[in-house]
Image: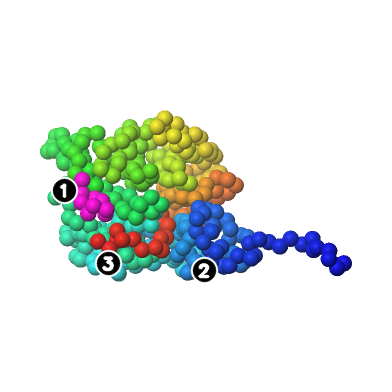
Amino acid sequence: MAKGRRSKRRRCPASSLTDDLVVEILSRLPARSVCRFKCVSATWRDLISHAVHRMKLPQTLAGFFTMHDGEMWSVPHFTNVSGTGPPLVSDSIDFLPIHKRTFILDSCNSLLLYKCSPILDMTDSHYFVCNPTTKEWAALPDSNLGHKGRALCLGFDPAVSSHFYVYEFFEDYVCFPQSVPSVRGVEVYSSETGERVHREDNAIIPLGYRSPSVFLNGCLHYLTYNDPAIAVLDTQGKPCRSIPVPDNEDYGFIQQSQGRLHYANFEADDEDKLTRLVVYVLEDHESQRWKLKHTAEASSVLDYTRSYLVREDFEWVAIHPDCNTIFYTVEPDKTLMSYDMDCQQVQVICTLGADTREKYFPYVPLFSELQALHI
């Protein structure tokens, strides 16, 4: 090269940044972008995957907690989203003060809601909210519901607040021959105030069977019984609105993905054979306007061993919070599968086993400490 002539090779600006500066920049990006930057180079992949740096960076879906029937009682397990390697998160909760017999009731982002008992028959039950990544926990104070039937949901959004909410739906049943609940209501516990708000209101509709709840925009969203709709409650237990589902069918599934509420379902024929997958995204809460995001033949999503499946052969697991991927299981051995809506590809992840309980708990790690779990 002649003297004084500049080299045509361009220096990469990022190469002059220290690792600490790169991590500081990445910490301000969405989890999906951070995952994509692992592909920039081996250096960036190792930088992002480093245990110390992971504590500062936004995390995405790590896997799923499940409950499995054992010889004496159900036990929790954690499965990586890849289905391979040792669990990224421990499924042991021996850090809780009571852990002889436990049930996972709900998960929301990075927290789990547990029902625990020091005895086998669960008559002396206690409730805990915990972060299995940091092994922090908080015991919930006793509710005022007595022996009323109840269902519990957890609400937590670390991007908005460090506090969590526990919703306890309750019903009082009247004597035969009447079979409908006489009172419907909800108690909401707030970790911020340490108190419960009790609300009895016939407008509060109980949770749909096995339907996951979604905590989004500071409100709890859940599918209701009977008439398919999504009920929305604020953190005071007050009904905000009822959002009609886009297909007016049973067996739908809701999740938060990429900051929006998603609804997925399988259409079926007269013989209940699944025919078509439909996925909608709620574009506007006020106008309740849904947009069809994706559709695919059921055979291309589910048909990997059989000519057709019916609803009883299939269970929803999750929609990925940061990308367009759906997770589900198929019978007879609860085979965990994923379907990528972008490239329309199906992947068999692993077999969970026929002893798996029919509820799944997605988990996103959170490495920072929460004051709400020190109460």
| Residue visible at 28% across and 36% down in the picture | 239
- Whether residue 80 sits left or right of residue 125 in the image: it is right
Q: What's the coloring here?
A: rainbow
Query: Which residue was labeled with disc 2?
Result: 50
Decide: is 271 above or below 160. Answer: above
Q: Secondary structure at mark 1?
A: loop
Q: Position of residue 190 (x, y in %)?
A: 26, 51
Q: Is residue 285 magenta?
A: no
Decide: is 259 above or below 69. Answer: above
Q: Give the residues drawn in magenta, as a range.
A: 189-197
For this rendering, which residue is in front, 20 or 123? 20
Check disc 2 and give the amino acid type: His
Check disc 1 and give the amino acid type: Leu
Check disc 3 and give the amino acid type: Leu
Q: What is the number of the mark on residue 42? A: none
| Residue visible at 26% across and 38% down in the picture | 238
Q: Is residue 191 magenta?
A: yes
Query: Which residue was labeled with disc 3?
Result: 96
